[in-house]
Image (tube, rainbow, N blue to C red):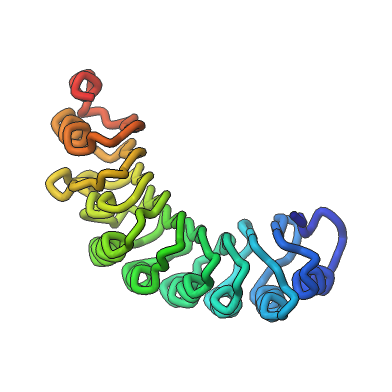
Amino acid sequence: MSAWGAQKRSIDDLVEGVESGRLACVVVLAGRVFDDAAAVKLATAMRSPTAKLKELRCSGHSISAVGAAALGRAAGASTTLEILDAGDATLGDDGAQALALCFRCPSFKQLHLEAKGIGDAGVVSLAAALSEGLDRLDLARNDVGEPGIVALGKALQARERPLRHLDVSGCLQARRVPVLAANVVSLRCADLAPGAFDCIDFAPGRKLFRLDVSNCGLDAASIKAIAEKASSLVELRYANNEEAGDAGAEAV
């Protein structure tokens, strides 16, 4: 793995390393300038027939939908990329739609899109393109509401294999979040608005092993319903649900 920024090297050095296949894993450190122009250069290098990039993490850097589009197209054309962390940026729905192209890569496994300003339209685009090979999707702290959650839930149910991990924590506009539990192994949906996790919609799949509903405004009856419906759970986190109290613990 190369931590770009640990030494005073230019973007051209990083581009050469990716283009030649010398670098397979790249973490762009916070001390470096990595903007749309740099993302476009790197994306061009990723399209080289000798490139072997498997992992790109540029968290802490601000790229727009322009940079996301370049990375998305390059990732979609790749046969080796497995992990993409798109950095700290307000990509919005256009950026999410561009990064949905990543799912065309046969080796792609993880997409990290925490706090990217993505709303329903962006999540609907991601859901429509969701690949069977994806293992992990991080959508925490975005602006997705009920339409995006429902679309994602339907896309997950259509998969032959369950998603290993999904994170929608801190999506304060989210509603009907339990529909996401039908075909995932691990679901993190902490820090949601009261009512976002309504147990009426909770019909978990047989392979739901981990669930985090901390700080979701749940009461003891809700915790009990979760425990009863999800018999496959090996880990249930429900901290900071004050209304659950001791009765919630007894129910579990």
Which of the 4 quarters of the picture holds residue 123?
Answer: bottom left
Up the image or down, 229 lies above or below 108; here it is above
Kindly identify the residue that appears in the image at 18 percent across and 47 percent down. 203
> 2 or 107, which is in the foreground?
107
Which of the 4 quarters of the picture holds residue 215?
Answer: top left
Up the image or down, 140 lies above or below 96; here it is above
Split into 4 quadrants, where in the image is the N terminus?
A: bottom right
As drawn, the residue found furthest toward the right would be 8
Expressed as whole percent of the image width and height from the top left, the position of residue 177 reads 25, 52
Expressed as whole percent of the image width and height from the top left, the position of residue 76 reads 54, 76
Q: Is residue 79 visible?
A: yes
Expressed as whole percent of the image width and height from the top left, the position of residue 181 reads 27, 49
Split into 4 quadrants, where in the image is the C terminus?
A: top left
Expressed as whole percent of the image width and height from the top left, the position of residue 59 reads 61, 57
Kindly identify the residue that appears in the image at 40 percent across and 64 percent down. 132
Q: Can residue 145 be seen in this view?
A: no
Tell how many labels: 0
> 159 or 196, which is in the foreground?
159
